[in-house]
Image: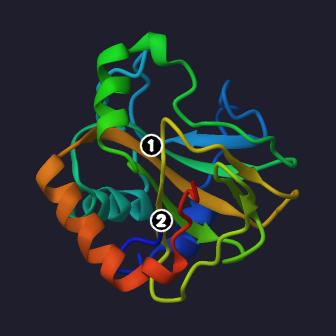
């Protein structure tokens, strides 16, 4: 579902500052740049101390608008090949407490399209079909089930950059943001059709 968060003004600069420093083990189709400290087993992390100017703007923006009490992982993803369908919380047994917390807060996988198309690069699986979502022009943000929604990039998209955000959710702020976004973007949301 698209999320009611204002457009970030430094997206072009984030792409210019992108440095592929690793390939995620659970999403091997992406090169990634970690903007938070690396903590094993989905531990609580902090923003890196060597952020560029655009990344510092991003830090302030994420801290202001996303409903996190604690960060786990903030990183930029850039595909280097077509990806397979996957669920983002790849190894639940590494942090059962965080997995249970995220499961109870779904949808809680926040993503921002930094660059790329607004339809056609992402596929989402429901219980009955695979859907290609459409993003409105008024926001770059969407939320996806972090523990329970299979999704993947449908093709190799060399110009696509996405901000991946994972953390401990503040229930009150999260609920308010989801309710507000549902009123605005219900027609864009992908629902399971049981």
Give residue 100's position: percent from left, percent from top. 33, 25
Other-residue count near label 2 (Cα within 10 Å), few / some / many at <14 / 14–19 / ≥20:
many
Give residue 19's position: percent from left, percent from top. 64, 47
Tag of residue 112: none
Q: Are marks 2 and 1 in contact (CB under 8 Å)?
A: no
Q: Write the residue at 50% across / 75% down.
A: 140
Tag of residue 142: 2
Inspect this view and state whether residue 4 appears: no
Q: Secondary structure at mark 2?
A: strand
Residue marked by disc 1: 35
Left or right of 90 on screen, residue 23: right
Q: Write the residue at 23% across / 56% down.
A: 174
Q: Secondary structure at mark 1?
A: loop
Left or right of 187 on screen, residue 79: right
Towards the viewer: 11 or 96: 96
Q: Write the residue at 35% across / 74% down.
A: 182
Give residue 158's position: percent from left, percent from top. 83, 61
Give residue 44's position: percent from left, percent from top. 29, 26
């Amino acid at each position: 579902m698209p999320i009611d968060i204002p457009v970030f003004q430094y997206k072009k600069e984030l792409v210019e500052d992108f440095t592929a420093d690793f390939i995620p083990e659970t999403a091997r189709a992406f090169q990634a740049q970690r903007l938070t400290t690396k903590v094993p087993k989905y531990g609580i992390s902090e923003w890196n101390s060597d952020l560029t100017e655009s990344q510092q703007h991003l830090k302030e923006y994420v801290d202001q608008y996303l409903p996190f009490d604690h960060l786990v992982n903030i990183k930029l993803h850039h595909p280097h090949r077509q990806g397979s369908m996957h669920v983002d919380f790849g190894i639940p047994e590494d942090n059962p407490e965080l997995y249970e917390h995220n499961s109870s807060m779904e949808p809680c996988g926040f993503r921002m399209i930094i660059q790329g198309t607004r339809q056609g690069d992402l596929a989402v699986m429901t219980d009955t079909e695979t859907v290609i979502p459409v993003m409105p022009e008024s926001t770059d943000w969407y939320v996806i089930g972090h523990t329970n929604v299979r999704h993947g990039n449908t093709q190799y998209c060399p110009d696509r950059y996405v901000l991946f955000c994972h953390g401990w959710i503040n229930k009150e702020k999260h609920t308010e943001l989801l309710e507000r976004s549902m009123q605005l973007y219900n027609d864009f949301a992908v629902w399971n059709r049981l």
